[in-house]
Image: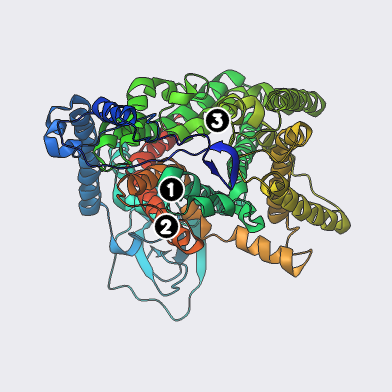
Amino acid sequence: MKLPDSIKVPSQPGKTLYLRMGLCFPSSCGASDVKLIMANLNVMGFMLPEVIESRCHADAPGSTGKFKTDALAITASAVMGALVLLVVICSIIDGICWYTPEDGLTWFSNRHEPKMIVNIQGQSNKVMELTDLSKPNSYENVTNEQIANGNGLVHKDPGIEMPQTMTVETVMIVAPAPDSLVKKLIQTFSLYKNVTALFQTKQPKGAVRSLDALRVFNMNWIILGHTYSMGAAFMQETLSNAKLAVEKVKDYTFMGVYSGMLAVDSYFFISGLLVSYLFLKTSAKNKGRWGPQLLIYYIHRLWRILPLYGILILVYAAFGQYLGSGPLFDWQSERVRDCNNNWWANLLFINNFYKPREMCLGWSWYLSNDMQFYVIAPIILIPLFLNAIAGGIIIGICFVAHWAVTAILWWRTDGQSYMQDPNIYYEAYITPYCRIGPYLVGLMLGYIFYKDYKLKQKLVAIVLWIVTIFLMGVVVYGQYGDVKDYGVTKPGWNRVQRTFYETFSRDVWGLCMAWIVYACNQGYAGKISTFTGFIGHILNWKGWTPLGRMTFATYLVHPIVIFIYVGNRRDLNHVDDFSVAFLYSGYVLLAYVSGAILSMIFEAPPAGLDRIVTKSLNGK
């Protein structure tokens, strides 16, 4: 409802107040009837507010039997059921045929590790196998003939004893017999295998440390921001303390939440770093054979992203309307309709350009940007691999073009942010040419890691740490001047301030992330000070690895968790620090649990198939 213009909100000068009111009407009334009734009452002189939108909420669709005739929901149920059944069957087969308690659901399973074989003098031509290096008295017996055949089979001989004195004649390493293709395929879908892999903290050789910690920290930052923007302040008309909620944005300490949009730029940086580092290493190995490498490069990316992404789109489009009911849940139906109409734009990764206001999974614009960056990355990386100067010039041209386009788009906003004008969100905020900066920074750091460049002076590292911490504070808290007077209702910055911040802030943030990652991986954290050493220890802790593996699925599913809770509420929301803290904790827990389940069932199996194919192509 729109109140008369004479009624203003003290904390929002110049802005008309809109209210949402819930009333009970007979079930025979529709939305148009409600508007007509209110209009007639006004004609009769009641002076009621103008009704600008009316919706009638009925029982949840599932309770009316609609699900039984919903073809999409039935199809999605069949697909999901078949996939889950496949996982269950493969897990049972793996558990019966190959699972053993000593190397089952542990983080340090060594079932596929090579064995150390020692030939002991005086043991009747027997070869002794040290099966567990942490238990020196644990031996098993295998004949020389079996070793010669190369099958690595082990036959236990309980009668053999460990001699008190030994003369070692030969030592050899014997790899276990290779698994059959059938076994590999079954274990790809096995929960025994995938749970172990998900929670294993061991990282592959040459992995860039600290990235898992950054993934987790930034994912939690995104969820915190969405707790406010999608959750507690999901619809300001339904807040019991709307005025206080608006005033909260003016709090200096709230800048840590308000600047959560920078977390997405952290992910762009991480993506650029990994793409660059792995692409350059592969290029060196392939010696410039670009054709096969590029083919695998693109297929690999699509195969790793599309299965889980496609499943979530299908689930949301098919079951979104059945996930709850209530006065706020009608909004969900509109988002479900967007998925039914525009799902194909998501799968083509063009949804940030094609009808972005009707985007399926509105938060998936990040995936489209990231894929678009991934597609053009070889245009930068191949020249960079061949000639550092040529590659550097191309990166420089990309930065200049990015700054120019970003500045032009934000200059046209007259100092407003997308909080004041939603059109800015679609025209600038989610566009690749405005967000590519941190990705380019990641590409450069990937090249530095590939070349293994190191700093030679400790003083330079100290200065870079000081500059990094200072710039991070400026980027996060620098927006306070924009919101301290009017919150998000009116811009506090002029056109020049807005344009400068939006053009350079994300790139500066990417540079800060680059130094932190470089310092933690090259030993420039602990060597500088106790504080930076503490940061290095925290970021390099292996315990972040399992959570880091879940972040892709967690990012996709966490807004749905928020929408389900908010959409099913039938009372007013109240925003304060404690209520939001409890909501946030619940969202984080449910998002990661949901992400882990989705990852094990729909992300890990395609990843396992990808490894099988890759090893086959490499002759392994």
Measuring 73% from the left and 60% from the top, which residue is drawn there?
525
> Label for residue 231?
1
> Which circle's residue, 1 or 3, is located before the other in the chain?
1
Please tell me which residue lies in front, 210 or 346. 346
> Label for residue 583?
2
> Label for residue 422?
3
- Residue 523 image position (x, y, % from top left): 73, 58
- Residue 581 image position (x, y, % from top left): 47, 61
Horizontally, residue 376 falls left or right of residue 457, namely left
Q: Quadrant of the N terminus?
A: top left
Q: Residues within 10 Å of mark 3 (few under 14, many from 20)?
A: few
For the residues labelled 1 and 2, the Cα–Cα distance comes to 9 Å
Element on which disc 1 rests: helix
Horizontally, residue 192 falls left or right of residue 123, namely left
Element on which disc 2 rests: helix
Q: Is residue 204 visible?
A: no
